[in-house]
């Protein structure tokens, strides 16, 4: 009974944190984009009307294909939760440092752009996979936000991992996600995300 209560509480806390974390990421990315033009003056509405711009940022991220965007986002969140609970294969899931860490987001940060470039024909040959990769930004967003939320949830509910571990991993994942969003806006697309030495050649952005 206690286990069921903890699981229910964990899921509720996760949902609350996920909503907060997602909005916070959108707000940070909005201000990053706002100040990127290096204007000397900004309108008060631009700086303070957050509700309007959270909605605009979300629409911007999902405008290509609303249903496909939500699908990719939902699958990514679900996979992130499954990944976290896989830590229970060799103990309790909330005690696993490896599965409550930056490990998987970092791998996806590297593998998604590589897959889009090197497995282009295979991806385009599968309609479902192709649609998912067309929404790689939202996939990475959903997965990263879910992992951040789950790490924080595990600490809040169980206190089984170190607060220093939580802080370090949350900030690294947040940094990777914001960088992914930033580079996705580059004219060369998300493929230019990785430096040339990983891909074996220089990208246009480096030249």
Image (spheres, rainbow, N blue to C red):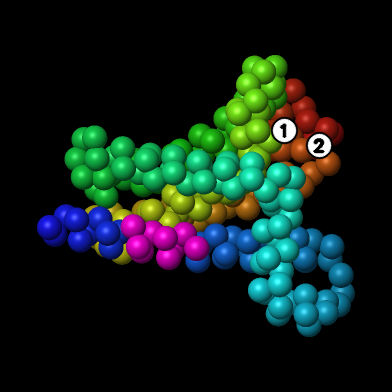
115 relative to 80, above or below: above
Quickly name the residue at label 1: 191
Q: Position of residue 18 (x, y in %)?
A: 47, 59
Magenta segment's dominant SS is helix
Q: Residues within 10 Å of mark 1 (few under 14, many from 20)?
A: some
Question: In front: 144, or 82?
Answer: 82
Q: Position of residue 73 (x, y in %)?
A: 56, 46
Q: Tell me if residue 197 can be seen.
A: no
Quickly name the residue at label 2: 188
Q: Position of residue 57 (x, y in %)?
A: 70, 60
Quadrant assignment, res 69: top right
Quadrant assignment, res 85: top left
Residue name at image x 35 percent, y 44 percent: 84
Q: Is residue 75 left or right of residue 6?
A: right
92 relative to 119, above or below: below
Quadrant assignment, res 2: bottom left
Q: Can you name the residue that lies furthest to the front here?
A: 67
Residue name at image x 33 percent, y 57 percent: 11
Q: CA distance from mark 2 to mark 1?
A: 7 Å
Residue 18 shown in magenta: yes
Question: What number of labels is visible?
Answer: 2
111 relative to 57, above or below: above
Asked which secondary structure carries label 1, the reply is helix
Q: Residues in magenta?
A: 11-19
Q: Tell me if residue 87 can be seen.
A: yes
Residue name at image x 64 percent, y 41 percent: 68
Q: Residues within 10 Å of mark 2 (few under 14, many from 20)?
A: few
């Amino acid at each position: 009974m206690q286990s069921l209560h903890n699981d229910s509480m964990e899921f509720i806390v996760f949902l609350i944190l996920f909503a907060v974390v997602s909005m916070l990421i959108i707000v940070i990315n909005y201000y990053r984009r706002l100040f990127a033009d290096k204007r000397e003056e900004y309108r008060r509405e631009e700086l303070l009307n957050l509700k309007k711009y959270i909605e605009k940022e979300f629409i911007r991220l999902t405008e290509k294909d609303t249903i496909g965007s939500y699908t990719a986002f939902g699958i990514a969140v679900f996979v992130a939760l499954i990944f976290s609970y896989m830590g229970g294969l060799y103990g309790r899931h909330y005690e696993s440092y490896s599965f409550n860490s930056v490990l998987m987001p970092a791998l996806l940060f590297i593998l998604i752009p590589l897959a889009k470039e090197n497995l282009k024909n295979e991806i385009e040959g599968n309609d479902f996979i192709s649609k998912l990769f067309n929404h790689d930004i939202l996939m990475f967003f959903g997965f990263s936000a879910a992992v951040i939320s789950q790490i924080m949830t595990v600490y809040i509910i169980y206190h089984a991992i170190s607060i220093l571990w939580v802080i370090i991993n949350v900030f690294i994942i947040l940094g990777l996600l914001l960088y992914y969003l930033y580079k996705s806006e580059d004219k060369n697309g998300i493929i230019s995300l990785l430096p040339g030495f990983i891909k074996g050649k220089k990208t246009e952005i480096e030249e």
